[in-house]
Image: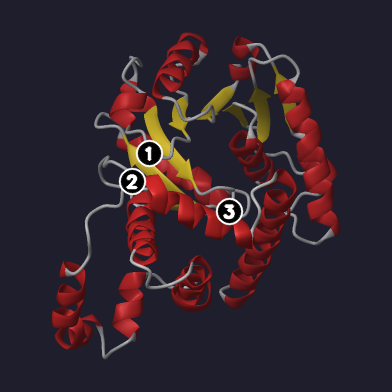
């Protein structure tokens, strides 16, 4: 087994995101300590990861150069915070999305961690200046926002605190690249970061089309999965414009006025509540019932599709 890196990463929180981060990091050959303050939770997480890695290996979808057993040998569970942080150069926080909880976690981490360690948060929308407000060494802090689930979707948004040292951004970027993720750097913090700002814009217009009775839930989703999503799985909106004409400048000449006309027709931000929300929810649940059995089956299908797409993209762009 190649353990030449022999570097340790601490994952704080053993839920879905914590488990997925742990799998990403061990796939890159890093030792990973999973911590959870709830008795037995970290141990259960390791057992769940064991099952997942073995299944991934059997299906030929295991990430990294190490076997499932070699990756598992790099993984350990802990309930003592100080012991978890011993020797760690990078800490990935994965507790639930609550500002006070995250502030408290980082305050506790700073009392136990070495001075040079990187404090990284998995928050999806809380700004670094809020999350790290109680940390003294803010220069060591950064947000590494994954896309759920990070083992299957490679994008990671790196968002600096206003005081983040540039070397921390570079260290985190290099680490994410090394373990097979696709990091993007935000130059400054902004509410919602990039992914959720774009995602919420799509959700808002989809919701308005539903409220206005223009389309069904099923057809709205098909617009993405069989239309825009087909392109966006490989190229982004800027390259799409560039390729859909003789370059971006030509695209703007052709479609600028139409884009502005359509954009000015958009309605206000939806409330996402009330009778319209009930109707949309009912329509959604008729397609996919919201009980655990149906939702879990669809999540498993989603993950299989994501793995297959990731493998296809890897083979197409060596």
Asked whether the viewer can see residue 273, the reply is no
Across and down, in percent, residue 94 comes to 54, 30
Circle 2: element type: loop
Circle 1: element type: loop
- Residue 211, compared with residue 140, is above or below; it is below
Q: Residue at x 65, y 29 (%)?
A: 14
Q: Nearer the viewer, mark 3 or mark 2?
A: 2
Query: Residue 261, located in which quarter of the rendered image?
Result: bottom left
Q: Nearer the viewer, residue 230 or 200?
A: 200
Across and down, in percent, residue 132 comes to 35, 23
Query: Residue 76, located in which quarter of the rendered image?
Result: top right
Circle 3: element type: loop
Measure how far apart labels 3 and 2 are at the Cα level: 21 Å
Disc 1 residue crowd, few under 14, some 14–19, many 20+, Cα 10 Å: some
Disc 3 residue crowd, few under 14, some 14–19, many 20+, Cα 10 Å: some
Q: State the residue position of label 1.
A: 125
Q: State the residue position of label 3.
A: 180
Measure how far apart labels 2 and 1 are at the Cα level: 7 Å
- The image's mark for residue 193 is 2
Would residue 180 appear left or right of 167 to someone viewing this image? right
């Amino acid at each position: 087994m190649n353990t030449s890196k022999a570097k340790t990463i601490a994952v704080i929180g053993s839920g879905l995101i914590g488990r997925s981060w742990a799998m990403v990091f061990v796939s890159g050959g890093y030792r990973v300590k999973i911590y959870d303050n709830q008795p037995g939770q970290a141990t259960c997480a390791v057992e769940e990861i064991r099952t997942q890695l073995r299944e991934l290996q059997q299906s030929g979808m295991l990430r990294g150069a190490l076997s499932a057993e070699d990756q598992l040998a790099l993984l350990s569970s802990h309930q003592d915070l100080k012991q978890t942080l011993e020797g760690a150069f990078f800490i990935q926080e994965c507790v639930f999305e609550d500002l006070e909880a995250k502030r408290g976690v980082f305050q506790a981490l700073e009392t136990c961690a070495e001075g040079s360690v990187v404090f990284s948060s998995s928050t999806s929308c809380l700004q670094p200046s809020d999350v790290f407000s109680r940390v003294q060494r803010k220069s060591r802090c950064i947000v590494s926002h994954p896309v759920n689930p990070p083992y299957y979707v490679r994008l990671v948004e790196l968002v600096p605190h206003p005081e983040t040292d540039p070397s921390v951004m570079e260290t985190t970027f290099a680490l994410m690249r090394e373990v097979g993720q696709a990091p993007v750097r935000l130059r400054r913090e902004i509410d919602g970061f990039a992914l959720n700002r774009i995602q919420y814009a799509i959700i808002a217009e989809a919701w308005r089309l539903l409220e206005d009775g223009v389309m069904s839930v099923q057809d709205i989703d098909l617009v993405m999965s069989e239309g825009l999503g087909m392109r966006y799985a490989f190229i982004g909106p800027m390259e799409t414009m560039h390729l859909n004409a003789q370059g971006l400048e030509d695209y703007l000449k052709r479609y600028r006025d139409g884009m502005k006309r359509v954009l000015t027709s958009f309605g206000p931000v939806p409330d996402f509540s009330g009778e319209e929300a009930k109707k949309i929810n009912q329509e959604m649940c008729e397609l996919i019932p919201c009980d655990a059995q149906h939702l879990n089956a669809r999540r498993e299908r989603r993950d299989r599709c994501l793995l297959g797409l990731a493998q296809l993209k890897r083979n197409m762009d060596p």
